[in-house]
Amino acid sequence: MVKIAPSILSADFKRLEADVSDMIQAGADYLHIDIMDGTFVPNISFGPMVIEALRPTTDLTFDVHMMVQDPERYVDEVAKAGADIISVQVEATKHIHRVIQQIHANDVKAGVVINPGTPVSALEAVLADVELVLVMTVNPGFGGQSFIESTLEKIRQLRQLREEHGYQYEIQVDGGINDKTADRVKEAGADVLVSGSYLFASADRAQAIAEMKA
């Protein structure tokens, strides 16, 4: 069954712990945490201190997406704060293989991420080395954007490559994921759905998660 990863970028920061707890009770599988630096993306979110503050409240998988230029500068700190998965943008570093090794050296699962304008071929050299591949289905930096249709083909390509080579990564999607787009990305091959504004705005979050999983 598909996994659901609520993105806390859309949470109410005045009651962040309560919102996270609510999502856990509603059936979330991962907690998606976006770290933005204002350089790689035109927005600033939060850093390792938020991860560290939330970590004692739950044993849920913390799925951290680093939208950060030169992420190798911060990987060790993010891992120490309590991340279970750290995903880095292939566009943000000149040394993607080295960063993956750095993540694994911290005993954390490694993921790689591509933006809508980046081809799957940019990842092929490291697909055997990662536990997760994230396809951005919007341009990263802000929540509440509309789903980009052309990203469906990337999901299909990643599923085909996994089947052909026996790779072990999960395929994750993030951006514009709601009750209307969930079925389409699942059909294309997605295993983990990141959803922010749709889930946090739902009157019945448990029902919203259940419908996305169904």
Image (spheres, rainbow, N blue to C red):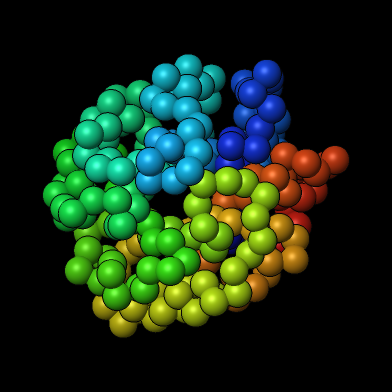
The quarter of the picture where the N terminus appears is bottom right
In the rendered image, residue 6, in percent from the top left (x then y), is placed at 61, 43
In the rendered image, residue 118, in percent from the top left (x then y), is placed at 38, 68
Q: Is residue 158 left or right of residue 15?
A: left
- In which quarter of the view is residue 184 placed? bottom right
**Residue 22 vertical position relative to residue 115 in the rendered view, above or below:** above
**Residue 153 vertical position relative to residue 132 in the rendered view, above or below:** below
The quarter of the picture where the C terminus appears is bottom right
Q: Is residue 202 visible?
A: yes
Q: Is residue 121 left or right of residue 58?
A: left
Q: Is residue 155 left or right of residue 7?
A: left
Instruction: State the residue at coordinates (57%, 51%).
Output: 194
In the rendered image, residue 69, in percent from the top left (x then y), is placed at 30, 43
Instruction: State the residue at coordinates (55%, 60%).
Output: 138
Instruction: State the residue at coordinates (30%, 57%).
Output: 90
- Residue lying furthest right: 203
Q: Is residue 110 left or right of residue 211?
A: left
In the rendered image, residue 171, in percent from the top left (x then y), is placed at 45, 63
Instruction: State the residue at coordinates (18%, 54%).
Output: 94
Q: Is residue 213 visible?
A: no
